Amino acid sequence: MKLKEIAHSRTGDKGNISVISVIAYKAEDYGRLCSQVTEERVRDYFSEIVKGNVTRYELPGIFALNFVMEDALGGGVTRSLAIDKHGKTLGCALLEMEI
Protein backbone atom coordinates (compact mmCIF):
# COMPACT_ATOMS: atom_id res chain seq x y z
CA MET A 1 0.00 0.00 0.00
CA LYS A 2 1.03 3.59 -0.33
CA LEU A 3 1.74 5.74 2.71
CA LYS A 4 -1.09 8.10 1.73
CA GLU A 5 -3.60 5.36 2.52
CA ILE A 6 -2.88 5.60 6.26
CA ALA A 7 -1.41 9.10 6.68
CA HIS A 8 -1.38 12.68 5.52
CA SER A 9 1.43 15.22 5.65
CA ARG A 10 2.24 18.80 6.54
CA THR A 11 5.37 20.48 5.30
CA GLY A 12 7.55 23.50 5.68
CA ASP A 13 10.87 24.80 4.53
CA LYS A 14 13.42 27.29 5.74
CA GLY A 15 16.42 28.08 3.62
CA ASN A 16 17.84 24.80 2.37
CA ILE A 17 15.99 22.65 4.94
CA SER A 18 12.74 20.82 4.24
CA VAL A 19 10.53 19.54 7.05
CA ILE A 20 7.88 16.89 6.43
CA SER A 21 5.44 15.68 9.07
CA VAL A 22 3.64 12.41 8.42
CA ILE A 23 0.52 12.01 10.55
CA ALA A 24 -1.45 8.77 10.85
CA TYR A 25 -5.18 9.05 10.27
CA LYS A 26 -5.78 6.43 12.97
CA ALA A 27 -3.89 5.81 16.21
CA GLU A 28 -3.55 2.12 15.40
CA ASP A 29 -1.45 2.93 12.31
CA TYR A 30 1.19 4.91 14.21
CA GLY A 31 3.25 1.77 14.93
CA ARG A 32 3.35 0.98 11.22
CA LEU A 33 4.61 4.49 10.51
CA CYS A 34 7.36 4.11 13.10
CA SER A 35 8.52 0.75 11.79
CA GLN A 36 8.32 1.44 8.06
CA VAL A 37 8.97 5.15 7.55
CA THR A 38 12.52 5.34 8.86
CA GLU A 39 15.26 7.92 8.41
CA GLU A 40 17.05 5.51 6.08
CA ARG A 41 14.01 4.89 3.89
CA VAL A 42 13.25 8.61 3.61
CA ARG A 43 16.91 9.37 2.82
CA ASP A 44 16.93 6.67 0.12
CA TYR A 45 13.55 7.78 -1.24
CA PHE A 46 14.83 11.33 -1.73
CA SER A 47 18.44 10.37 -2.55
CA GLU A 48 18.50 12.46 -5.73
CA ILE A 49 17.35 15.59 -3.89
CA VAL A 50 18.50 15.44 -0.26
CA LYS A 51 22.25 15.88 0.07
CA GLY A 52 22.42 16.31 3.86
CA ASN A 53 21.21 14.55 6.98
CA VAL A 54 17.69 13.26 7.52
CA THR A 55 16.56 13.30 11.15
CA ARG A 56 13.31 11.75 12.38
CA TYR A 57 11.43 12.96 15.44
CA GLU A 58 8.62 10.89 16.88
CA LEU A 59 5.47 12.62 18.16
CA PRO A 60 3.40 9.79 19.64
CA GLY A 61 0.88 12.13 21.25
CA ILE A 62 -0.38 13.14 17.82
CA PHE A 63 0.57 9.91 15.98
CA ALA A 64 3.11 11.71 13.81
CA LEU A 65 6.68 11.56 12.59
CA ASN A 66 8.59 14.71 11.72
CA PHE A 67 11.47 14.53 9.24
CA VAL A 68 14.03 17.30 8.98
CA MET A 69 15.97 17.06 5.71
CA GLU A 70 19.08 19.21 5.41
CA ASP A 71 20.56 20.42 2.12
CA ALA A 72 17.35 19.41 0.42
CA LEU A 73 16.10 22.36 -1.61
CA GLY A 74 18.83 23.08 -4.13
CA GLY A 75 20.28 25.92 -2.06
CA GLY A 76 16.94 27.20 -0.77
CA VAL A 77 13.64 28.36 -2.17
CA THR A 78 14.94 31.72 -3.38
CA ARG A 79 18.06 30.19 -4.97
CA SER A 80 16.64 27.10 -6.64
CA LEU A 81 15.41 27.07 -10.21
CA ALA A 82 13.43 23.88 -9.57
CA ILE A 83 9.92 24.70 -8.36
CA ASP A 84 9.09 21.06 -7.68
CA LYS A 85 11.76 20.67 -4.98
CA HIS A 86 10.01 22.76 -2.37
CA GLY A 87 8.45 21.46 0.83
CA LYS A 88 4.83 20.97 -0.14
CA THR A 89 5.70 18.97 -3.22
CA LEU A 90 8.11 16.78 -1.24
CA GLY A 91 5.35 16.00 1.27
CA CYS A 92 3.05 14.83 -1.52
CA ALA A 93 5.89 12.80 -3.02
CA LEU A 94 6.62 11.06 0.29
CA LEU A 95 2.97 9.98 0.58
CA GLU A 96 3.49 7.97 -2.61
CA MET A 97 6.07 5.75 -0.82
CA GLU A 98 5.17 2.05 -0.75
CA ILE A 99 4.95 0.65 2.77
Image (cartoon, grey):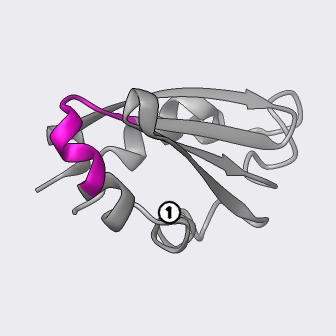
Nearer-the-camera pick, 82 or 70: 70
Expressed as whole percent of the image width and height from the top left, the position of residue 91 reads: 47, 37
Q: Is residue 13 visible?
A: yes
Looking at the image, which residue is at 69% across and 47% down? Answer: 68
Image-quadrant location for residue 11: top right
Nearer-the-camera pick, 45 or 99: 99
* Amino acid type of the residue that numbered disc 1 sits on in the rendered structure: Val
Q: Residues within 10 Å of mark 1 (few under 14, many from 20)?
A: some
Looking at the image, which residue is at 24% across and 57% down? Answer: 32
SS state under label 1: helix
Q: How many marks?
A: 1
Instruction: Provide the residue span drawn in magenta.
Output: 23-31
Expressed as whole percent of the image width and height from the top left, the position of residue 25 reads: 22, 28
6 displayed left or right of 94? left
Nearer-the-camera pick, 68 or 13: 68
Looking at the image, which residue is at 57% across and 68% down? Answer: 43
Quadrant that contains the N terminus? bottom left
Quadrant that contains the C terminus? bottom left
Residue 38 in the image: above or below residue 69: below
Residue 76 in the image: above or below residue 57: above
Image-quadrant location for residue 61: top left
- Residue 86 is a magenta residue: no
Residue 17 in the image: above or below residue 8: below
In this figure, which residue is indicated by the disc labeled 1?
42
Q: Is residue 9 visible?
A: no
